[in-house]
Image: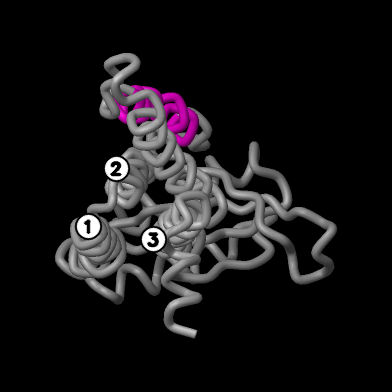
Amino acid sequence: MKAFFLTLWQNDILRLALDSAFKLVLAAVCGGFIGYEREHSHRPAGFRTHILVAVGSALVMVTSSFLSRQYAGVMDIDPTRMSAQVISGIGFLGAGTILREGFSVKGLTTAASLWAVSCVGIAVGSGFYVGALIATLVIYITLNLLKRVSARGNAGRNLYVEVEDVGQQASRVGKVIRRCGGDLAAMELLNIDSEEGKRKKAPVLKILVYTRNLHDLDLIVESIRAVEGVRDLYVE
């Protein structure tokens, strides 16, 4: 039995297929791990996008290595050229996450995570598994844990305000926040499924607010709830 599996492993096609499959699956796991955090934070590039970026980057490196071996001695192929195009070309996805951010210029962190995930995919595709796994852990800690530390340090809170009409309620809510002593740092428009049915989209304003203390935050929340046209509100 041992000789049988050894013979199978010595088959170049089978070994290449297993090696490629392992790299692509590992890249998908690493990208999905980061993408899950972005999806949970309601970012425009989430779970599936990060998986696709990681798998595509890994495939580029696998293909580069394959071409280098396939044409060894026939022509000189630099396996790093294709990966360099991935790193520079991922910018169009990052730009898309920034441009679609509602009322403010946001999405830089998500754009950076897409770029970092592409680098993780390249590391996996090249066989640098240790570096890829460590980078994945560091990226996740940066996006998730450090975000919480930063939020505690400057008393920033995200308010998700479900409204009937964005054009009218956005300005009213902003005035309420300033009147109650809060600092409105950012406001963006989300489309989240309402409780009445998943087919119906409810306009939701995601508002980043800085307050001096919890009393001011409670006052802002109660004042926003009293605004005409506000259907629901929850604090993150």
| Residue lying at 46% horizontally and 67% vertically, measured from the top left | 7
Q: Position of residue 125 (x, y in %)?
A: 35, 47
| Residue lying at 43% horizontally and 82% vertically, measured from the top left | 2
Q: Circle 1 sits on which residue?
A: 135
Main SS, magenta region, reads helix
Q: Residue furthest bottom?
A: 1
Residue 96 on the magenta span: yes
| Circles 1, 2 touching at the beta carbon (< 8 Å) | yes
The disc, 1 or 2, on the residue closer to the chain's N-terminal end is: 2
Q: Which residues are magenta?
A: 82-98
| Circles 2, 3 touching at the beta carbon (< 8 Å) | no
Amino acid, disc 3? Cys
**Corner quadrant of residue 135:** bottom left
Mark 3, Cα crowd under 10 Å, few <14 / some 14-19 / many 20+, is many
Amino acid, disc 2? Cys
Q: Position of residue 49 (x, y in %)?
A: 53, 47
Depth check: give the residue in front, 124 or 229. 124
Tell me: residue 201, above or below residue 213.
above
Say whether residue 214 is left or right of residue 27: left
Mark 1 → mark 3, Cα distance in angstroms:
9 Å
Q: Circle 2 sits on which residue?
A: 119
Q: Circle 3 sits on which residue?
A: 30
Q: Position of residue 192 (x, y in %)?
A: 66, 57
Q: Position of residue 102 (x, y in %)?
A: 52, 36
Tell me: residue 92, above or below residue 7.
above
